[in-house]
Every structure is written in C-alpha cells, then in structure tokens.
Amino acid sequence: MVSMTIHAVIMTATGEVINIIEWDGVASYAPPDGCELRETAENTAIGGTWDGSKFILPAKVGPSRLDVLMSEGPATEVYNEETTVMDDRPADDIAADKAELLGLLQTKLADTGDLTWEEMNKMLALERET
C-alpha cells in the first residue's frame, strides 16, 4: 500500500502556498506552470509562504466590520465604567450602526453579487426600517 503525504503547491516566484494536496509521490502529477511541490508539515496553510528553508503561516486576520455587526448587531447598551451598569446607547448611535451595516451589505452585494441568507434577510429588514 502506497502512503499518501501532504504537499504544498508553491508559486516559485513568490513562495506563496496556493494549495495543499495529498500525493503518494508515485502517481503522475505535475504542478501548474510556475509552481513547485514541497512535502510539508502541519504548520502549512494556503496563503502562507515558503522562504526557501521553512514554511511560514499566513498572518491571522481579525473579523471585518461587517462580520462584527452581523454577529453582534448594533449594540443597544454600553457598559458605563463609572456606575458599573449597562446604559442605553443614544438612538443616533444605534441608527448610525444600522446605516453602516446596511451600507456594508449593499456594497458587498454590488461587489460580489452574493449575500448569505442571513445577510440578505438583515439587509431587507434594515431597508424596511428606513
């Protein structure tokens, strides 16, 4: 039985890892033009790089503003450090967050032509409020 190993497909010119594949090293396979294969360890990911001697993981990117507003929604309360209680946020601040979220969703739809079901429902609800 032939053992499969993990290989990174690397853009030769830049060192960028563009794919991770399993390959037995025996079957006929040629990487795309301008790419090379390198057997890899667990610390490899698409978007990472090969510096000629080791793999470097891609930088972690935090959530986008759209992701934050979609997951938390416009906050209606804010923590008051002086009184140590939750205070209502001003209506203008909540309205600004909703307007920002609607704009981000409309921009994503215009740019990609695609929204998730949740994003589409949120956008429609925000449009009905205005």
Image (cartoon, rainbow, N blue to C red):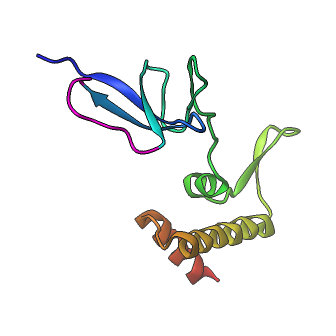
53 shown above or below 90: above
121 shown above or below 71: below
Nearer the observer, 98 or 105: 105
62 shown above or below 44: below
Estimate the x, y position of residue 86 in percent, counting from the top left.
74, 46
Residue 92 belongs to magenta span: no
Q: At 45% across and 64% down in the image, what residue appears?
A: 118
Tell me the quadrant of the picture where the C terminus can be found. bottom right
Residue 28 belongs to magenta span: yes
Q: At 46% across and 38% down in the image, what residue appears?
A: 35
Nearer the observer, 27 or 112: 27
Estimate the x, y position of residue 1 in percent, counting from the top left.
11, 16
Estimate the x, y position of residue 103 in percent, counting from the top left.
66, 72
Residue 69's image quarter? bottom right
Image side of residue 11 versus residue 103, left or right: left
Predominant SS of the magenta segment: loop
Estimate the x, y position of residue 84 in percent, counting from the top left.
80, 37
How many numbered discs, if any?
A: 0
Q: Residue furthest right?
A: 82
The region drawn magenta spans 24-33
Nearer the observer, 87 or 58: 58
4 shown above or below 31: above
Q: Residue furthest left?
A: 1
Nearer the observer, 98 or 110: 110
Q: At 22% across and 33% down in the image, what residue appears?
A: 28
Q: At 62% across and 46% down in the image, what residue appears?
A: 63
